[in-house]
Amino acid sequence: MTSRVKPKYIVGIDLGTTNSAVAYANISSAKRYGTRSVKVLEIPQLVATSQVGSASMLPSSMYLPGEHDKRSAFRLPWTEGADPGYVVGQFAQTQGAKVPGRLVTSAKSWLSYGGVDRTAEILPWGAQQSVSKVSPVTASARFLEHITQAWNAAFPKALLADQEVVLTVPASFDDVARTLTVQAAADVGLRENLVLLEEPQAAFYDYFRSHASELAEAAEERLVLVVDVGGGTTDFTLIQIAWNTDGEAPVPDVRRIAIGDHILLGGDNMDLALAHVAEHRISGERGALDASRMGALVQSCRAAKEVLLSDPAEAPECFTVAIPGRGTKLVGGAQTCELTRDEVESAILDGFIPKTDITEHPQRTGRSALSAWGLPYASDPAITRHIAGFLSRHGDEDGPAVPAAILLNGGVFKGDAIRDRVIDTVCTWRRD
């Protein structure tokens, strides 16, 4: 009989559609110092050919090398001389934007899509037959494998498989997606001490922790709306906070009262919408690119969005996006165009965060124009209309449920303009 190793750390893994991240705390220190003991793991990864760097986030991108790639250049310190059949992270993202048909992205969205066999080798979607594809489960496992190896390299005496691991998932994941997520973790040795936590609830716990004193002082019943917009999914959760004031200090009673449908809508859709703008500008027509070249253009437009919607004081006025050439003209045959900061912000705000009334709900327009890229994205891209529909479904005889507080979570809300638009729109729905 073998004895289990006592965990030294509690480790939280956000396995995201676009980026993944890891936070951790020494269990004994956390009991004494609370969240002050929480740290973010710097994840080693390839940032260029044969160049390793570390970053707080690991892009959830997987590049499958071709015959012209020098595989030895993809080695990491822990590969021990082996030539890997793939690379994940920053270099995978940038290389995949240059070479069409070899980049796996949005594995988390594919993992949640019941319309395909999620264990079948279908990614990269639309790639040529000569490319050795992987399944959504395998891709997810490869991201977790990289995280596990990075952790073990940093903590060789406290292997990740022996720690308390919390892995976040969308609240709207179905049972199959949750099971496959656990399978992906088990494939890399994360079997013991593994807990799944819904992402909106994780965000709420952090909010509640940081505002506990002021919430307890007010001791008011309030309804909190959590809007979690990630790279590939949009999740809504309603949480009711009530207080038991019979004792010396108010005791919170926190209940999750509703979660939304699984909506394939997020940063990926914004990137794809921008890619269609660029495609039309370069080629003069929409639909001119095959799936692999469109995939590379989407990666370029994702970079444009992230750069142009960053801090206004530092963001440039425009960004050049590119469609790679083919074969021997991979570099020389590239076509480019510029996207400006104003047009990117306008396209995202008007297309995805429009100002709406609470009576305006998602429009059923049939097959989404964006679903042609493989995934059945939401036919209505307006996140604000989806919020209105969710609140209306969970209201009462007096009308839709209107929250007293809004908690925004996800990388999409890093942009001030996007964050402010959601808050301003929902605030206009308040009952006076």
Image (cartoon, rainbow, N blue to C red):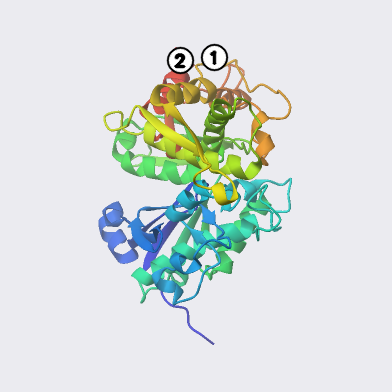
Residue under pointer 1:
357
2 and 1 marks in contact (CB < 8 Å): yes
The foreground one among 114 and 343 is 343
Q: Is residue 309 visible?
A: no
Q: Is residue 65 positioned above or below 348 on the image?
A: below
Q: Residue 177's spot in the image, x, y percent?
A: 64, 52
Q: Is residue 411 positioned above or below 382 on the image?
A: below
Residue depicted at 56% across the width and 43% down the height: 325
Q: What residue type is disc 1 on?
A: Asp
Residue depicted at 38% across the width and 73% down the height: 158
Dot 1 falls on a residue whose secondary structure is loop
Dot 2 falls on a residue whose secondary structure is loop
Q: Earlier in the sequence, mark 2 or mark 1?
A: 1
Q: What residue type is disc 2 on?
A: Thr
Q: Residue 266's spot in the image, x, y percent?
A: 54, 36
Q: Residue 220's spot in the image, x, y percent?
A: 39, 29
Residue depicted at 43% across the width and 56% down the height: 12
Residue under pointer 2:
428
In this rendering, would 2 be left or right of 304? right
